[in-house]
Image: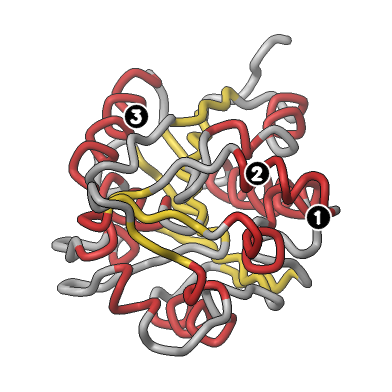
Amino acid sequence: MEMTKNLTIILVHGAWADGSQWKGVIPFIQKAGYVVRAVQLSLSSVEEDVARTVDMIENAGSPVLLVGHSYGGIVVTSAGNHKNVVGIVYLAAFAPDTGESLEMLLGRRQSYGAENIYPDKKGFLWFREEQFHNSLCQDLDAENGMVLAVCQRPIHSVCIGAEMNDPAWKNKKCWYQISTDDQILPAETQNEMAKRMSSEKVFNLDAGHLSMLSKSQETSSIILEAASYIEEF
């Protein structure tokens, strides 16, 4: 398919996941004429994940719209400072301020999902398989939830505690999608982050944490609305 837009949309997944979780979004973006890329994060350190994302930004050869989900929000908040990045879309994502970490933001409120995370001997954090569906994707069917639980990729605890230095949302145009039925990152915390970054627009979706899977068309529309806005300026 011929890409007709001078804008690359780079998708950045969260913890316990990989780039395949954008499978419902990618076709919509391509059909709209945009180049779309999905980063495969290591989930071993924020520094490495930011570096992988910056490499993809620099290889794009065009302006870039970053899209981050969950932990991916930490990554795009740092990588978004690159001069080629013209906007950032947060999907139920962590958007830390200077000195804040994912752990600090998650600790603002108690959540059902956070209680089901446990470490292994090497410091990687896993989600209890039997609680994965109810915690992260209760709006998907049970079979899909089971597959995601079995295929989960753990995130290292150093990623959870890493503090933000220079948040890109302070100087880039941003959009935020709140998942109102999120069982791990409370909607109230998402709303607070969206408000303080002075988002161009805030979207509320009746969705669990994995909104790009349960509401693929809706999240794609949010991304494409941001992309269209950027192209106008």
In percent of width and height, residue 58 lies at: 29, 24
Residue at the image point whose x is 48% and y is 63% from the top: 93
Give, as a three-letter code, the residue at label 3.
Ile
In percent of width and height, residue 174 lies at: 46, 61
**Of tags 3 and 2, which is closer to the observer?**
2
- Give the answer, above or below, for where 189 lies relative to 142: below
Residue at the image point whose x is 33% and y is 42% from the top: 43
In percent of width and height, residue 230 lies at: 53, 46
Give, as a three-letter code, the residue at label 1.
Leu
Residue located beneath label 3 in the image? 57
Residue located beneath label 1 in the image? 140
Provide the secondary structure element on which disc 3 rests. helix
Q: Nearer the viewer, residue 226 or 180?
A: 180
Q: CA distance from mark 3 to mark 2?
A: 28 Å
Contact? badges 1 and 2 (CB < 8 Å):
yes
Q: Nearer the viewer, residue 221 or 171?
A: 221
Is residue 157 found left or right of 62 in the rendered image? left
Residue located beneath label 2 in the image? 148
Of mark 3 and mark 1, the one earlier in the sequence is 3
Of mark 3 and mark 2, the one earlier in the sequence is 3
